[in-house]
Image (cartoon, rainbow, N blue to C red):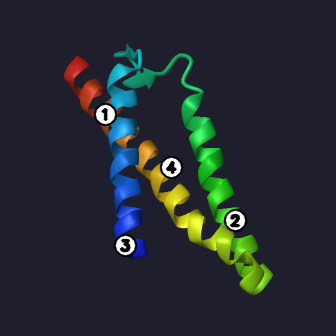
Amino acid sequence: QSLPNKVFEYLAGGLAIGALRGFTLQLQVDHMFDKVRLPRARGSFLVALGLVAAVLLEIGGSFAGPAGLPFRTIAPEIAAACAGMLTGRAMAIAMRWRDDS
């Protein structure tokens, strides 16, 4: 299987997981200031750290040359899954927020 196909699979999986998480999160909608508060939503911070780690793996693997190739092959999948999770969660929260207002 080629790399772009695998990346799209990880992206689709991340979108599904993120959307599921976004639909199951508890929302506190502040109608006066038009804001949404997400209590105990620490998971997104960890996913964002995973995305940063994937970028650092890619950069470090490119600096290492041929020895860093194993790191460079897994970094796109990690980045796609993390980006998909963050995007899916944000889209689900936006859809729920508009339904509540």
Label 4 SS: helix
- Mark 4–mark 2 Cα distance, whole angstroms, equals 14 Å
Kindly check if marks 4 and 1 are in contact, taking CB atoms under 8 A apart as contact. no
> Which of the pair 54/100 is nearer the observer?
54
Kindly check if marks 1 and 3 are in contact, taking CB atoms under 8 A apart as contact. no
Kindly check if marks 4 and 3 are in contact, taking CB atoms under 8 A apart as contact. no
Quarter of the rendering occupied by the C terminus: top left
Q: Amino acid at mark 4?
A: Cys
Q: Amino acid at mark 2?
A: Leu
- Mark 2–mark 1 Cα distance, whole angstroms, equals 29 Å
> What residue sits right under mark 3 in the picture?
1
Is 73 drawn above or below residue 77 in the view shown?
Answer: below
Kindly check if marks 4 and 2 are in contact, taking CB atoms under 8 A apart as contact. no
> What residue sits right under mark 2 in the picture?
57
Residue 92 is marked as 1
Q: Position of residue 91 (x, y in %)?
A: 32, 40
Task: Specify which label sits upstream in the sequence, 4 or 1.
Answer: 4
Task: Specify which label sits upstream in the sequence, 1 or 3.
Answer: 3
- Mark 1–mark 3 Cα distance, whole angstroms, equals 30 Å
Depth-wise, is mark 3 or mark 2 nearer the camera? 3
Task: Specify which label sits upstream in the sequence, 4 or 3.
Answer: 3
> What residue sits right under mark 4 in the picture?
82
Kindly check if marks 3 and 2 are in contact, taking CB atoms under 8 A apart as contact. no
**In which image quadrant can residue 93 be found?**
top left
Crowding at dot 4, Cα within 10 Å, few <14 / some 14-19 / many 20+, comes out as many
> Which of the pair 32/78 is nearer the observer?
78
Q: Is residue 37 left or right of residue 98?
A: right
Residue, far left: 99
Q: Position of residue 26 (x, y in %)?
A: 41, 15
Task: Specify which label sits upstream in the sequence, 3 or 2.
Answer: 3
Q: Is residue 53 visible?
A: yes
Q: Amino acid at mark 3?
A: Gln
